[in-house]
Image: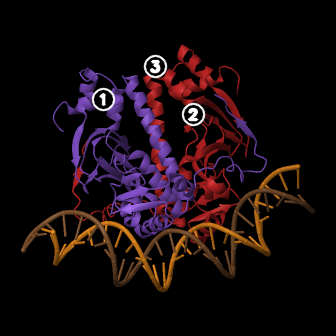
Chain colours: A purple, B red, C brown, D orange
Amino acid sequence: MSRPGACRLFLSATFGIPSGTELTRQLSELATPVTVMRGETVETDPTAASLAFLTGGATKLSALAARGRHQIVAFHFGGDIFSIPAEGLHRHVITGLRDSALFLFPARAFYDRAAASPRIMRTLLERSQTALFRCRDKAVNLGRKTARERVAGFLLGMAERLDCPDDEPGCIKLPMSRRDVGESLGLTIETVSRQITELKEAGIIDTRGRSCIVLHDLDQLAAQAGNVEPRDAMSGLAPAAQRVVMVQ
Amino acid sequence: MSRPGACRLFLSATFGIPSGTELTRQLSELATPVTVMRGETVETDPTAASLAFLTGGATKLSALAARGRHQIVAFHFGGDIFSIPAEGLHRHVITGLRDSALFLFPARAFYDRAAASPRIMRTLLERSQTALFRCRDKAVNLGRKTARERVAGFLLGMAERLDCPDDEPGCIKLPMSRRDVGESLGLTIETVSRQITELKEAGIIDTRGRSCIVLHDLDQLAAQAGNVEPRDAMSGLAPAAQRVVMVQ
DNA sequence: CGGGATGTTGACGGTCTTCAAAAGCGGTGG
DNA sequence: CCACCGCTTTTGAAGACCGTCAACATCCCG
């Protein structure tokens, strides 16, 4: 994993560029390879933003607030690229959900060198926007949704990102504990548990052991998630709000 | 505002590139100039992400969820660049807080052409990351903070982004209504109002009319915001969590 | 100065949290 | 293979915080 050259191969595969170039060599020089075992936590440089490339495993990125409160801002899986801010209002740490391997880069230096490659910059920009859009959806969930809606939405989101074992359709194996789910959704583990029980009683999902959840009815689950509905959402805006519709 | 050439000048000023180039011409061809009056709402292309350049004024970006619920995901001021996602879990709309002017671009096409300029890509990437980090902080606020903490944090954040009139130090003129504050913080307007009253009674702030707030004591306000404290935040992590500290 | 929108205050109720205890899963060792 | 033990999860009851509903006050604009 920390064998020299592993980083260059990963860079090349991620960005679709040849691995033998001067650029991949320069970038890989900046890398710090890190392995994070399940439950272990990594702190990055508090004075500057870092860039992380998760080559394998699964991690969570948590923000820490006063009075020991934690908010998970994102889950990441193999192949993900994500950034960790310098310490500002909250400190951010990476924790392994499974044994994981990643490369850490000082963000600024990485960008300085990557600027030479439009392809890399384009990919970074698109990944960053994806993260932003996901984070905004999370903000809506945390700010405006009930516990039921948050849990239903969480299960749907995980069903998209995790692949289920071939033998049982709609079955997902959550790599995180109820505590993690709660810290991601802004709920306590008790509330998460109660919501799962209720979804189970409604016949929408089922549980297999601790970490497996079978999604019987995706449509009904989506209906529970309280996301935007076709065309009712505009009601409640300023009464005479003008609308300028963009085309193209 | 929509005079041809205005967009090129703005692009040039924003990215620090010459305005007479072929690139700025190409990019400005993609622009749709829009003026949004106070209270007016703009919808962008629901099928693809858009990029917005706010040349002047102030706007909010809201996400719409089921049952007419709104969550403001960001406020923007003159000079800001921000992106609006295609319709996914939630629909996003731009609304003017003041009379505002902006240029809208189809994001993909803009990136395709901007890829030729490392400078533009670098700026876009950094702005996107700033937006992401702000959104994460918002997620922490919405998920883990009390009403008091959210309002205190909001006032501090606005004090940083808005400039106060020279004659009265610590005085900020909020361009948004209590409703907007509530929709940004995941609270009702009544709760926002009560929190402001309590901060006022504690002597930490004062109000002047509807939209002006005087921040008497920034330190005490920060203490109310519940952000990360120097070194107590790690308590509560997994007991024996190993930590790998990054340098550089 | 008057009217309407915006903001404040009060009483009550619901949802989620907190605190506490029981149950269940999963790994280890006999 | 089964029994045991620790940790995660579930379940229950009580309480806190914020939302809802309603009335009143205030600001701002014409």
Looking at the picture, how far across and down is residue C16, in whole percent? 50, 68
Q: Alpha carbon of mark 1 to alpha carbon of mark 2: how far?
A: 27 Å
Question: Disc 1 marks which amino acid?
Answer: Ala
What label does residue A165 carry, if any?
A: none
Residue at which label 2 appears = B48
Question: Disc 3 marks which amino acid?
Answer: Ala
Residue at which label 3 appears = B116
**Image point (24%, 65%), residue name:** B239
Chain bearing tag 2 is: B
* Quadrant (top left/top right/bottom left/bottom right) for the N terminus of chain A: top left
B221 relative position to A123: left or right: right
Front-most of residues A2 and B168: A2
What label does residue A13 carry, if any?
A: 1
Looking at the image, residue A127 lies above or below residue B134: above
Crowding near the residue tagged with mark 3, few <14, some 14–19, many ≥20 C-alpha atoms within 10 Å? few
Chain bearing tag 1 is: A
Front-most of residues D29 and D5: D5
Q: Quadrant of residue B69?
A: bottom right
Looking at the image, residue A233 lies above or below residue A30: below
Crowding near the residue tagged with mark 1, few <14, some 14–19, many ≥20 C-alpha atoms within 10 Å? few
Are discs 3 and 2 located on one and the same chain?
Answer: yes
Q: Is residue B69 visible?
A: no
Q: Secondary structure at mark 3?
A: loop
Looking at the picture, how far across and down is residue B247, in whole percent? 24, 44
Chain bearing tag 3 is: B
Are discs 1 and 3 located on one and the same chain?
Answer: no
